[in-house]
Image (spheres, helix red, strand yellow):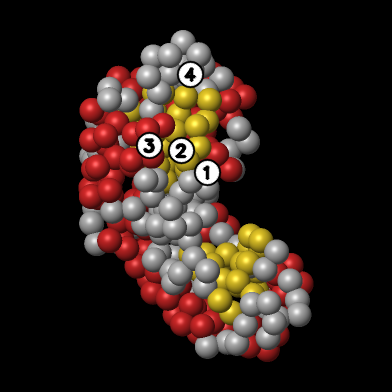
Amino acid sequence: MESIVDLRSDTVSHPTPAMREAMYRAEVGDDVLGEDPTINRLEEMAAEKMGKQAGLFVPSGTMGNLAAVLAHCQRGEEAIMGNLGHTYLFEAGGISALGSVFANTLPNLPDGTLNLDEVRLAIRGRDIHQPVTRLLILENTHNRCGGVVLTPEYMRAAGELMHSKGLKLHLDGARVFNAAAALGVKAADLAADADSVTFCLSKGLCAPVGSVLCGSTEFVASARRIRKQLGGGMRQAGVLAAAGIVALEQMVERLPEDHARAKRLADGLANIPGIEFPLGYPQSNMVFVQLSQNIPFNASEIASRLLTHGIKVGVTGPRMFRMVLHYWVDDSGVEDTLKAFRTIL
């Protein structure tokens, strides 16, 4: 079989040659003791990128989101979030299992937002029968809504609402640099009104491991202790942070290339009978497509046939696929994918 074009997710991306070289040469120390210079540098860079006082290197975005929730909320309190949000759908119920934090879900709108009037109504009073509302979680880009982007204006309005009530806002910004690239703004503009923000190094930025949680100095100090409780205190992990530094220095500016290829892929698929776009055209690096009812195969069957052509796609529903563009899928990979779809359909 020819080389695989892996579109299942940008999590399948692997480190660039520059990252591997930086990892080999990384200066390291004991990060639990605060003595790993490479991690310290990464955390400072990340905080600056997000416009925050401090950063915390964590093994995964899931741990970063969990640590943020546990730092903001006490046991028995609640966090408001979207019913299609990553924290609700894909983090194994960690905030409840490990923090006894109640998830109050509201329906995500097609653009990934939550209706702020509904958020306002969902904020609890001081009725002793109810949990205490403490936090709102937003996601940008929003995965399950199609990789859509939330604007700085919306983020500002959400932050103003929460802060007017004495509450906190956490941004799950796993792909916030994709959102910033799509909008032509800085990532810090999207995180400005959030009390905390997590972003992933290991998706479109191609680092092998890790995310960074950013916020105030006081918040990050609390989250650092929680990271230790969760088993996320790493020792000479500068070898990982070194790849993250390269990611921030070299990979952020190239993300529009992935977005352009996503649009090119969508344009090609739109010309194939039986392909529909129920979540709209791609705004970032994700392409969601659905098989029309006149196609006599389901998504899993089509995915199996695509694999025989060297194409891997994500199946997200009985008749729906997700394809995610990243550094390791070039123009020829897009053309190979379109050729495979045309052959099969």
Which amino acid does the dot numbered 3 rest on? Val
Labels 4 and 3: the sequence-earlier one = 3
Within-10-Å neighbours for mark 2: few <14, some 14–19, many 20+:
many
Name the residue that disc number 2 marks. Answer: 81
210 w.r.t. 293: above or below: above
Q: Is residue 151 left or right of residue 317?
A: left
Residue at mark 2 to residue at mark 3: CA–CA distance: 9 Å
Please, what secondary structure does the residue beneath circle 3 have? helix
Residue 2 can be seen in this image: yes
Within-10-Å neighbours for mark 4: few <14, some 14–19, many 20+:
some
Q: Is residue 215 left or right of residue 12?
A: left
Name the residue that disc number 1 marks. Answer: 83
Where in the figure is residue 199, as x and y percent of width and height? 40, 44
**Residue at 29% across, 31% down:** 162
Residue at mark 3 to residue at mark 1: CA–CA distance: 13 Å
Q: Name the mark nearer the viewer: 4 or 2.
A: 4
Is there a contact, CB below 8 Å, between mark 4 and mark 2?
no
93 w.r.t. 109: above or below: above
Is there a contact, CB below 8 Å, between mark 4 and mark 1?
no
